[in-house]
Image (tube, helix red, strand yellow):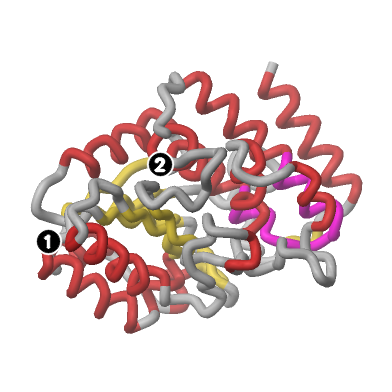
C-alpha cells in the first residue's frame, strides 16, 4: 500500500538506489547509468510514496499501474523493485545475463509489475490510456502512471494518446516525463526541439506541472497535486540531470555509459560520503 515516508527517508532511499545502479552497470561494464542516476529521485517518490502496491501480492487487482515506457531504463527500475520488496535481491546477480528475466529492456518476464513490454519507444502512454479507461469503466480507484522519456515525444503515437487522454478527461492518469534532454543521438533539443512541452499538453486538456525532478520535495508535491486534480490527466515535467548525485558524471549525455572499475569505485565513494 502507500507508505508515509518522510522527505529525508525518501532522500536516503534515492541514495541507496543510486549506489545499486552503479553496481549493476559496473557488473556489465556498460549500461544505462546516466539515466538511472538522474531518475533515482522520481522513481523513489513514485514507488516509495505514491504507488499503492502489495509486496505479497504483486498482481493485486486494486494496485496502481506504472508503465515503464522507457523500458531500457532497467538499472534504476530493477534496483527500485528490489528495494521496495517487490523482487528478490538475488535476481540482480543475473542482470542482463542470457536467459535471465532481467533483460536490458524490461519485459513481462519479470512479472506482473511490468505492466507492458515497451522496448519500442513511444508505446507506453497508449497502453496507459487503455488501462485508465478500464479502471474508470470498472469504477476502480486505482491510478495509472507512465514514466516517459523526452526523446519519446518525437513519436507521433505519444501525441495521439495524449489527445485521447485529455479529451476523455482521464484524471486517474499521470505521466512523469524524465526531462533529462538526452537521447541516443545526443541532446534532445539539437535533434528535435520539443519546448514548450507543458503548454502543448495543456492545449490537449492536461494539467501540466513543471518541477525539479531531482528535488524530492518538489516531486512529492507534484504527485500529490496530480492525485488531487479532477477532470484532467496530469503531466509532470520532471527536469532531471543525467548522472545526478555523482558530480563528475553530472551532465554527461551518454546514452550507454562505459563505466570503468575506477570510475565505479569513485562514484560509490561519492555516494557513500553523501549518505553520511
Name the residue: 90% across, 45% down: 262
Q: Which residue is mark 2?
A: 51
Residue 196 visible at all: no
Q: Element at badge 2?
A: loop
Quadrant housing residue 232: bottom left
In three-dimensional space, the C-alpha distance between marks 1 and 2, rounded to whole angstroms, equals 21 Å
Residue 246 placement (x, y as % from top left): 67, 39
Label 1 Cα neighbours within 10 Å, binned few <14 / some 14-19 / many ≥20: some
Q: Which residues are magenta?
A: 20-36
Label 2 Cα neighbours within 10 Å, binned few <14 / some 14-19 / many ≥20: many
Q: Element at badge 1?
A: loop
191 vs 245, nearest the viewer: 245
Left or right, residue 196 beside residue 115: left
9 vs 130, nearest the viewer: 130
Q: Residue furthest bottom?
A: 156
Mark closer to the chain start, 1 or 2: 2
Picture quarter with the N terminus = top left
Residue 187 placement (x, y as % from top left): 51, 68
Q: Residue furthest top?
A: 276
Q: Which residue is mark 1?
A: 169
Residue 140 placement (x, y as % from top left): 23, 51
Left or right, residue 205 beside residue 272: left
Left or right, residue 9 beside residue 272: left
Q: Is residue 245 magenta?
A: no
Picture quarter with the C terminus = top right
Name the residue: 83% across, 46% down: 263
Name the residue: 48% across, 39% down: 54
Relative to 148, residue 251 above or below: above
125 vs 116, nearest the viewer: 116
Amino acid at each position: 500500500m502507500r507508505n508515509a515516508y518522510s522527505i529525508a527517508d525518501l532522500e536516503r532511499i534515492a541514495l541507496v538506489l543510486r549506489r545499486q545502479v552503479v553496481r549493476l552497470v559496473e557488473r556489465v561494464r556498460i549500461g544505462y547509468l546516466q539515466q538511472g542516476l538522474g531518475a533515482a529521485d522520481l522513481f523513489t517518490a513514485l514507488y516509495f510514496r505514491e504507488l499503492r502496491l502489495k509486496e505479497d501480492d504483486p498482481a493485486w487487482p486494486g494496485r496502481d499501474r506504472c508503465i515503464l515506457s522507457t523500458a531500457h531504463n532497467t538499472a534504476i527500475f530493477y534496483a527500485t523493485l528490489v528495494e521496495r520488496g517487490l523482487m528478490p535481491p538475488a535476481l540482480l546477480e543475473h542482470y542482463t545475463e542470457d536467459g535471465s528475466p532481467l533483460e536490458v529492456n524490461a519485459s513481462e518476464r519479470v512479472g506482473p509489475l511490468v505492466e507492458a513490454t515497451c522496448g519500442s519507444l513511444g508505446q507506453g502512454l497508449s497502453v496507459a490510456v487503455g488501462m485508465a479507461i478500464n479502471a474508470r469503466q470498472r469504477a476502480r480507484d486505482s491510478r495509472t502512471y507512465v514514466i516517459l522519456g523526452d526523446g519519446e515525444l518525437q513519436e507521433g503515437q505519444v501525441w495521439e494518446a495524449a489527445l485521447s487522454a485529455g479529451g476523455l478527461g482521464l484524471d486517474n492518469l499521470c505521466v512523469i516525463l524524465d526531462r533529462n534532454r538526452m537521447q541516443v543521438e545526443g541532446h534532445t533539443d539539437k535533434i528535435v526541439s520539443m519546448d514548450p512541452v507543458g503548454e502543448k499538453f495543456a492545449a490537449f486538456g492536461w494539467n501540466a506541472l513543471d518541477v525539479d525532478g531531482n528535488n524530492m520535495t518538489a516531486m512529492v508535491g507534484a504527485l500529490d497535486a496530480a492525485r488531487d486534480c479532477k477532470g484532467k490527466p496530469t503531466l509532470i515535467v520532471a527536469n532531471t540531470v543525467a548522472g545526478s548525485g555523482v558530480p563528475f558524471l553530472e551532465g554527461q549525455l551518454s546514452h550507454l555509459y562505459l563505466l570503468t572499475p575506477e570510475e565505479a569505485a569513485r562514484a560509490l565513494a561519492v555516494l557513500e560520503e553523501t549518505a553520511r
